[in-house]
């Protein structure tokens, strides 16, 4: 039996009248507690997630994050899900690394289309000093000058690189744990879970907000999903953004034969992430393109308050911008308006 939601007596200053009080923030959730949440009857789980979400994030605003791959493919890591790994035979090669001005052009277009955050990806094991890093810093400065949040995902980094990114104004650094510590070795062998946690600690030390989540649909058990969420929720403070990806099973990767994720499994994962990390942004990430409008609305209802917005992710497709505008309008949710979060 698991306890009902624990609440603080206080309410958020801008809470909707009649909304439940703000949920408490915990970092000591156990794997069995989390697994019990993942296995709740869906209606009960949705009710719980709704109560937490409405209390912690009144107003149902959804942040729009656009994604651009600056350096695509040729990565020496062996992540089994990733089309950009040199170890996989997926056909992602031949794209030149983008320069500063074309990237900023794409950022301007994303802003014009209504994006709030511009995320840039590099298919690297780690950041190395030199011209590409100097260009990354210029891109971050340029994106911030446009008034957009800037996020970078580029693998491991050093303390001094993190400090320079912070100085350039980087809002957030994305580095996912991907799966549970127990399932991890079946997915990646070229870097350890501990190295991921150390990278995240460096991001935090530099004062950059943390974007960290994972992927479902890689052959993991429900206990693995609970274990991933347990590690995320044990981070103190919780990651400011938590991307929840459904595997995009790309031909040429070892996971190409994985069956598609049941959308209701994604709904459950989003709902439990929302309950555990009430004030984090839970981003409904890869895997949305093949989901029905109704499945996506259920994810929003379960507490997702950010989506990747734009026709492509890094190397694969995403829902079309027009379809997303219609989706948000049909759901009656507003884009995020508070740039401080
Ligand atoms: N190389 C950097 C790294 O690994 O941190 C940055 C780019 S990497 C592509 C960013 C994240 O995208 C991965 O950690 C993984 O969670 C997600 N990702 C990559 N391929 C995916 C796929 N086929 N399906 C779902 N998510 C994927
Ligand atoms: C995240 O968690 N998902 C995004 C972003 N962070 C970098 C990437 C998804 C990639 C999906 C496969 C592709 O397009 O290559
Ligand atoms: Fe490289 Fe990142 Fe892809 Fe792993 S997920 S192969 S580190 S680009």
Image (spheres, helix red, strand yellow):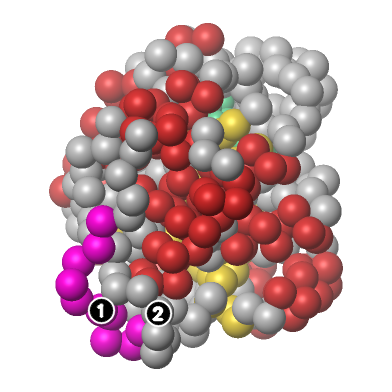
Image: 22 above or below 32:
below
What residue is shown at x 83% (from left), y 68% (from top)?
Answer: 323
Q: Secondary structure at mark 1?
A: loop
- 111 falls in the magenta region: no
The x and y percentages for residue 316 are 76, 42
The residue lying toward the viewer, choosing from 313 and 85, is 313
Q: Main secondary structure of the magenta part?
A: loop
Q: Which mark is residue 19?
A: 2
The x and y percentages for residue 200 are 29, 39
Q: Earlier in the sequence, mark 2 or mark 1?
A: 1
What residue is shown at x 47% (from left), y 57% (from top)?
Answer: 49
Find the magenta span and give its range: 6-15
The residue lying toward the viewer, choosing from 313 and 286, is 286
305 with respect to 219 (left or right): left
The residue lying toward the viewer, choosing from 41 and 163, is 41
Q: CA distance from mark 2 to mark 1?
A: 9 Å
Q: Secondary structure at mark 2?
A: loop
- Please name the residue that numbered disc 1 is placed on: 11
Q: Does the closest atom of ligand 2 sit within 8 Å of the Cβ of label 1? A: no
């Amino acid at each position: 039996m698991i306890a009902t939601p624990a609440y603080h007596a206080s309410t958020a200053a801008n809470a909707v009248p009649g909304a439940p009080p703000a949920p408490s923030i915990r970092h000591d959730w156990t794997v069995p507690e989390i697994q019990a949440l993942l296995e709740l009857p869906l209606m009960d789980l949705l009710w719980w997630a709704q109560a937490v979400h409405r209390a912690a994030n009144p107003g149902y605003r959804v942040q729009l994050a656009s994604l651009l791959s600056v350096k695509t493919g040729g990565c020496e890591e062996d992540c089994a899900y990733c089309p950009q790994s040199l170890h996989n035979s997926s056909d992602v090669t031949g794209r030149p690394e983008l320069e500063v001005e074309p990237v900023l052009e794409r950022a301007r277009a994303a802003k014009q289309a209504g994006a709030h955050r511009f995320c840039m990806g590099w298919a690297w094991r780690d950041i190395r000093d030199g011209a590409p890093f100097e260009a990354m810093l210029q891109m971050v400065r340029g994106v911030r000058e446009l008034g957009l949040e800037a996020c970078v995902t580029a693998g491991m980094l050093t303390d001094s690189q993190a400090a320079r990114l912070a100085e350039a104004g980087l809002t957030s650094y994305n580095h996912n744990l991907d799966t549970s510590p127990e399932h991890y070795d079946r997915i990646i062998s070229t870097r350890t879970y501990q190295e991921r946690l150390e990278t995240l600690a460096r991001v935090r030390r530099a004062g950059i907000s943390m974007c960290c989540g994972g992927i479902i649909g890689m052959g993991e058990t429900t206990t693995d999903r609970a274990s991933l969420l347990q590690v995320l929720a044990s981070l103190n403070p919780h990651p400011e953004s938590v991307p929840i990806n459904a595997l995009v099973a790309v031909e040429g990767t070892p996971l190409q034969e994985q069956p598609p994720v049941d959308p209701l499994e994604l709904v459950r994962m989003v709902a439990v992430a929302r309950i555990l990390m009430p004030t984090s942004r839970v981003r409904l990430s890869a895997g949305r393109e093949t989901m029905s409008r109704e499945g996506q609305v259920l994810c929003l209802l379960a507490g997702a308050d950010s989506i990747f917005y734009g026709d492509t992710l890094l190397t694969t497709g995403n829902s079309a911008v027009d379809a997303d505008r219609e989706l948000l309008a049909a759901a009656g949710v507003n884009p995020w308006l508070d740039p401080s979060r």
